[in-house]
Amino acid sequence: GENVEQHPSTLSVQEGDSAVIKCTYSDSASNYFPWYKQELGKRPQLIIDIRSNVGEKKDQRIAVTLNKTAKHFSLHITETQPEDSAVYFCAVHNAGNMLTFGGGTRLMVKP
Amino acid sequence: SAVISQKPSRDICQRGTSLTIQCQVDSQVTMMFWYRQQPGQSLTLIATANQGSEATYESGFVIDKFPISRPNLTFSTLTVSNMSPEDSSIYLCSVVKRGARREETDTQYFGPGTRLTVL
């Protein structure tokens, strides 16, 4: 089955700095890569996603890049704010129509 | 998007008992899933709830322990049977919503979760 690894597990940045979270996956047939943000006590919320026919996608301060050859994709958050503090999960969607999640990254943005 | 509700939002149960969690969606969806999220951990897929047939379980999860019903395209239940403290977790319902237009992607949404504590 699909194996998704996410790094780092925790990330602490100063407000205004950038944060980068990286995920690798094993199944080359995987075709959809969403990122979820989960605030404490709340449900995971989709924040951005990318399909395998696109290398990069941006939405305001967040962007996702995909390298299909190397089988990795990354979440980039610029100009971080305290409200960006949360746990972020990458996920990989395969032909079985299911998501496999990475282990999560706890992002802490210090004011 | 999809509006998903779950009941109960939380419960504290005694070991050996069973709890049924309900998931209601505001529109018909084909794909419906149940996940478990243990404290400080990632999301683990328990099973796919299939309408009109038996659920499809992931490795490590069995029907006797986690029976699932899916009577229609907007509702599902997950039962946690014969509970032990190891079952203490958050259980999340999730659905896939088709994009409104052909070029839009399918998106997976999560319910608010049910926080279960087993004593």
Image (tube, grey):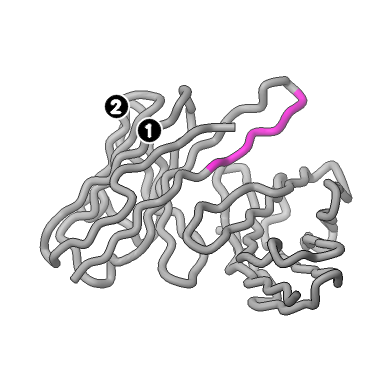
Residue A64 found in image quarter: bottom right
- Above or below — where is A27 with respect to B2? below
Query: Are the numbered discs 2 and 1 placed on the same chain, yes or no?
Result: yes
Quadrant holding the C terminus of chain B:
bottom left
Give the percent coordinates (x, y) of residue B11: 25, 57
In the rendered image, the residue lying farthest to the top is B101
Q: Quadrant of the N terminus of chain B?
A: top right
Query: Hey, which quadrant is residue A96 in on the image?
Result: top right
The reply to whether dot 2 and dot 1 touch (C-beta < 8 Å) is no
**Kind of residue sitting beneath label 1:** Gln
Determine whether, in the image, residue A18 is placed left or right of residue A92: right
In the image, is residue A95 above or below residue B42? Answer: above
The CA distance from mark 2 to mark 1 is 11 Å
Q: Which residues are magenta?
A: B103-109
**As shown in the figure, which amino acid type bears the numbered disc 2?**
Pro
At mark 2, the secondary structure is strand
Numbered disc in front, either 2 or 1:
1
Q: Which residue is mark 2?
A: B71
Task: Using the image, tell me which numbered label, if any, was put on residue B24.
Answer: 1
Q: Residue at x 48, y 72 (%)?
A: B40
